[in-house]
């Protein structure tokens, strides 16, 4: 298994300076940026449109992903691809396991979702298909090890990166240390215990 990637959610960023925010996240060392797209119907909030994502695309070179929390994702796919998103989270190339209740940032991690992640990993491994598991919701250095042990390969962190008291680079480095420690201390045996 490769080391999990760090994905920064911009849901909690300063919307008045999103271009700078994504540039700072890239400088801090994240592997990609996630845009939480909400339609006000599937979840109660509205968030970013494709035009906002497109306006920020020139500020970074890291991949963008659109987390489509919308009732009908089909009409949303092309606009966000055109805006510069490399991935849309609705298909089964990447299975997203929410570790909070969707729609609002800043919630507490639901440890019970690790069981769902471990079960998803077991089912995926049985297919032999190259499907990644991404976890989203209160991912930090404290919660990342459990998510990784359960099978996560992509970790979405918002508040843990955006509001870290020592800055974003320190937050990303702290996450990487937590991930590296987890992956070097027998992740496979932990998965077998969970499964």
Image (cartoon, grey):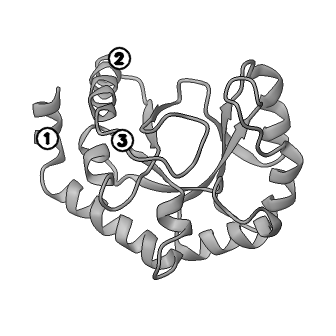
From mark 2 to mark 1, how far is it between C-alphas? 20 Å
Q: In this rendering, which labeled residue sits more in front, label 2 or label 1?
A: 1
From mark 2 to mark 3, how far is it between C-alphas? 17 Å
Give the image location of residue 30, x and y in percent: 53, 65
Neighbour tally class for label 2: few under 14, some 14-19, many 20 plus, Cα within 10 Å: few
* Image height of 189 relative to 42, above or below: below
Question: In this figure, which residue is indicated by the disc labeled 1?
Answer: 190
Question: In this figure, which residue is indicated by the disc labeled 2?
Answer: 127
> Which element type, helix, strand or loop, lies under badge 3?
loop
Question: In this figure, which residue is indicated by the disc labeled 3?
Answer: 152
> Which element type, helix, strand or loop, lies under badge 1?
helix
Q: Is residue 156 left or right of residue 65?
A: left
User: Which image quarter: residue 59?
Assistant: bottom right
Which of the two discs, 3 and 1, labels the residue nearer the N terminus? 3
> Which element type, helix, strand or loop, lies under badge 2?
helix
Front residue (pair 177, 1): 177
Front residue (pair 20, 185): 20
Which of the two discs, 2 and 3, labels the residue nearer the N terminus? 2
Are the two marked residues, 3 and 1, in contact with CB atoms closer than 8 angstroms?
no
Q: Residue at x 61, y 37 (%)?
A: 103
* Image height of 14 relative to 89, above or below: below
Which quarter of the rendering shows the N terminus? top left
Give the image location of residue 7, x and y in percent: 53, 54
């Amino acid at each position: 298994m490769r080391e999990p990637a760090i994905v920064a959610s911009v849901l909690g960023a300063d919307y008045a300076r999103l271009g700078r925010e994504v540039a700072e996240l890239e400088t801090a060392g994240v592997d990609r940026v996630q845009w939480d797209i909400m339609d006000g119907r599937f979840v109660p909030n509205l968030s970013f449109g494709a035009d906002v994502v497109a306006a920020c695309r020139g500020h970074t070179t890291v991949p963008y992903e659109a987390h489509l929390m919308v009732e009908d994702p089909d009409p949303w796919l092309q606009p966000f691809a055109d805006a510069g998103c490399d991935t849309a989270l609705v298909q089964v190339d990447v299975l997203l396991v929410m570790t909070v209740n969707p729609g609002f940032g800043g919630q507490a991690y639901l440890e019970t979702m690790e069981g769902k992640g471990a079960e998803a990993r077991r089912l995926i491994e049985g297919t032999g298909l190259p499907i990644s598991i991404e976890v989203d919701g209160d991912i930090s250095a404290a919660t990342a090890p459990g998510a990784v042990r359960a099978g996560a390969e992509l970790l979405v962190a918002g508040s843990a990166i955006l509001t870290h008291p020592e800055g974003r680079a320190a937050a990303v480095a702290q996450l990487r240390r937590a991930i590296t420690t987890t992956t070097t201390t027998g992740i496979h045996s932990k998965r077998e215990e969970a499964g």
